Image: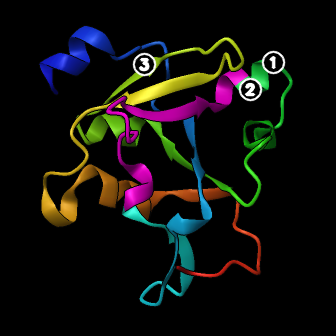
């Protein structure tokens, strides 16, 4: 685990390994996986933010505690889908899971760590292949 993550985005052990971490997936990250016969998120959907911040997620447990539907994190993101990985999977890939609430979103958190190294076993590829759709892409999506 990186020193940067441990210092700036420490793992919160109160977040159970079974907790679903919800990730918004934009349409340009939907891919048809002919080997699996499914549409899944691309591995690029699980990289850190373009501005260098760790990957944003939403804690499903906080949404439930606040009587909110998962779909609420997609408001204002037309055409996006919502995928889930578990906090335990993130930790297995040497990532920290750290709450990072925003003024407009209490469930916002980050997953911090190297997501690119490891080739076929990189965190971003494992996340993409392990993710399950909470809200799948619309049937009419066009792969770019």
Residue at x-position 14% and y-position 63%: 119
Q: Name the residue under label 1.
A: 66
Measured Cα–Cα span from mark 3 to mark 2:
16 Å
Answer whether labels 2 and 1 touch (C-beta < 8 Å): yes
Q: Name the residue under label 2.
A: 63
Question: How many other residues sit within 10 Å of disc 1, few (<14), some (14-19) or many (≥20)?
Answer: few
Q: Name the residue under label 3.
A: 98
Residue 124: % across, % down: 32, 53
- Quick one: 68 or 104, which is closer to the camera? 104
In the rendered view, tell whether residue 143 sits above or below residue 34.
Answer: above
Whether residue 88 sits left or right of residue 77 in the image: it is left
Q: Earlier in the sequence, mark 1 or mark 3?
A: 1
Q: What element carries label 3?
A: strand
Residue at x-position 53% and y-position 34%: 57
Q: Quadrant of residue 138?
A: bottom right
Q: Is mark 1 on a helix, strand or loop?
A: loop
């Amino acid at each position: 685990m990186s020193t940067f993550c441990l210092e700036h985005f420490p793992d919160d052990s109160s977040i159970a390994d079974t907790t679903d971490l919800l990730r918004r997936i934009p349409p340009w990250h939907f891919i048809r996986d002919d080997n699996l016969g499914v549409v899944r998120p691309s591995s690029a959907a699980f990289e850190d933010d373009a501005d260098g911040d760790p990957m944003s997620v939403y804690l499903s447990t906080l949404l439930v505690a606040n009587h909110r539907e998962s779909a609420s994190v997609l408001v204002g993101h037309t055409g996006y889908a919502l995928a889930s990985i578990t906090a335990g999977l993130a930790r297995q890939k040497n990532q920290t899971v750290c709450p990072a609430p925003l003024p407009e979103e209490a469930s916002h958190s980050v997953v911090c760590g190297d997501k690119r190294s490891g080739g076929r076993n990189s965190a971003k590829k494992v996340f993409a292949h392990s993710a399950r759709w909470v809200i799948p892409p619309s049937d009419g999506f066009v792969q770019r």
